[in-house]
Image (cartoon, helix red, strand yellow):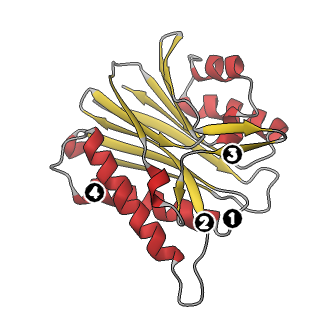
C-alpha cells in the first residue's frame, strides 16, 4: 500500500522543542514507520532522550528489513532503545536523569502495528469513525500529571510498550501526536478536523493553528493516509 503523510513540530510557548518526529518509508518492503517522542519535562536533556529513542527505533527497523512486524519485534526494539538511552545518560562525569514518551505506528502491507509508552497518542480513523485511540499511561494528581510508562534512563523497566495491531484499508488515516496537541485541542474538534476531506497539509495547518492559540507545550503531529 502507498502512504501519504504530512507533519508539523513547533516549540509553542516553551523555550525549546523537546519533541522529535521521524518517518521512514521502505517502498521495496511495502513498509513504513512513524515515530513521535516527547522529551519529559522536569528532567534534563529531554530533547536528547527523544532523539536517542526515536533514532534507535528507526535504525532497528532499517537494520532488520526481513523481520516481520510483531509485538515481539517492538519489544526487542524498545529494549535496544532503552539500553542506548542508559548508555547516553551514563556520562564520565555523572549519570543524567532523562526520559521521553513514545508513540509509533509501523505499517507493513495491509497491517499497522501501534505501540506507545506514556501520553503521546495515536488515532486510527476510518470514514467518520475513530477506530482506535491509544490510552494515556498517566495518572492525574492535583495540579499535575504523572507519566506511568516512558523511556527513563534510571528505570529501563518502565519502557514496556502497549502494542495493538489492525488491518488497514484504503482511505484510513493515522494521526500520531505529542500531548501538546491532544491536551489543548478539544477531542471532538480534533477528530473532526482529522477526518476533513482536505489535503493532509491543510488539515495539519488547522490543527497547528489551534495549538498555536491554546497549547502551553511543544506540539508535534504526523498525519498519514493509506492511498
Cα separation, mark 4 vs mark 3, equals 33 Å
- Disc number lying in front (3 or 2): 3
> How many dots with numbers?
4
Mark 1 or 3 closer to N-term?
A: 1
Instruction: Look at mark 4 in the image and give the residue it sits on.
Output: 62
- Callout 2 crowding tier (Cα within 10 Å): few <14, some 14–19, many ≥20: many
Of labels 4 and 3, earlier in sequence is 4
Q: CA distance from mark 1 to mark 4?
A: 30 Å
Q: Quadrant of residue 113?
A: top left
Q: Quadrant of the C terminus?
A: top left
The quadrant of the image that shows the N terminus is top left
Lower sequence index among marks 1 and 4: 1
The x and y percentages for residue 128 are: 53, 9
Lower position in the chain sequence, tag 2 or tag 4: 4
Residue denoted by label 2:
98
- In this orientation, does residue 22 appear? no
Confirm or deny contact between disc 1 and disc 4 (CB under 8 A). no
Q: Residue 178 location, x and y as percent? A: 62, 43
Q: Nearer the viewer, residue 93 or 211?
A: 93
Q: Which residue position is annotated with label 1?
A: 43
**Numbered disc 4: secondary structure:** helix
How far apart are labels 1 and 3 at the CA level? 13 Å
3D distance between C-alphas at marks 3 and 2: 15 Å
Is 76 located above or below residue 93 in the figure? above
Image marks 4 and 3: residues in contact by CB distance under 8 Å: no
* Marks 2 and 1 in Cβ contact (< 8 Å): yes
Q: Which residue is mark 3?
A: 146
What residue is drawn where x is 74% and y is 23%? 186
Which residue is pictured at 59% across the width and 23% down the height?
A: 194
Q: Secondary structure at mark 1?
A: loop
Amino acid at each position: 500500500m502507498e502512504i501519504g503523510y504530512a507533519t508539523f513540530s513547533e516549540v509553542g510557548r516553551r523555550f525549546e522543542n523537546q519533541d522529535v518526529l521521524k518517518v521512514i518509508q521502505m517502498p521495496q518492503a511495502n513498509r513504513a514507520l512513524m515515530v513521535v517522542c516527547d522529551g519529559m519535562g522536569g528532567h534534563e536533556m529531554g530533547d536528547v532522550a527523544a532523539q536517542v529513542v526515536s533514532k534507535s527505533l528507526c535504525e532497528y527497523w532499517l537494520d532488520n528489513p526481513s523481520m516481520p512486524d510483531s509485538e515481539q519485534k517492538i519489544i526487542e526494539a524498545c529494549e535496544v532503545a532503552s539500553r542506548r538511552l542508559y548508555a547516553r545518560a551514563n556520562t564520565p562525569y555523572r549519570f543524567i536523569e532523562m526520559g521521553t514518551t513514545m508513540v509509533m505506528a509501523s505499517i507493513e502491507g495491509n497491517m499497522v502495528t501501534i505501540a506507545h509508552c506514556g501520553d503521546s497518542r495515536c488515532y486510527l480513523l476510518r470514514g467518520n469513525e475513530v477506530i482506535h485511540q491509544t490510552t494515556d499511561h498517566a495518572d492525574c494528581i492535583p495540579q499535575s500529571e504523572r507519566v506511568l510508562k516512558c523511556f527513563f534512563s534510571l528505570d529501563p523497566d518502565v519502557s514496556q510498550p502497549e502494542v495493538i495491531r489492525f488491518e488497514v484499508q484504503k482511505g484510513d488515516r493515522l494521526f500520531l501526536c505529542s500531548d501538546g496537541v491532544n491536551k489543548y485541542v478539544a477531542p471532538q474538534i480534533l477528530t473532526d478536523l482529522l477526518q476533513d476531506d482536505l489535503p493532509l497539509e491543510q488539515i495539519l495547518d488547522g490543527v497547528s493553528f489551534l495549538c498555536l492559540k491554546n497549547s502551553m507545550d511543544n506540539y508535534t503531529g504526523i498525519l498519514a493516509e493509506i492511498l
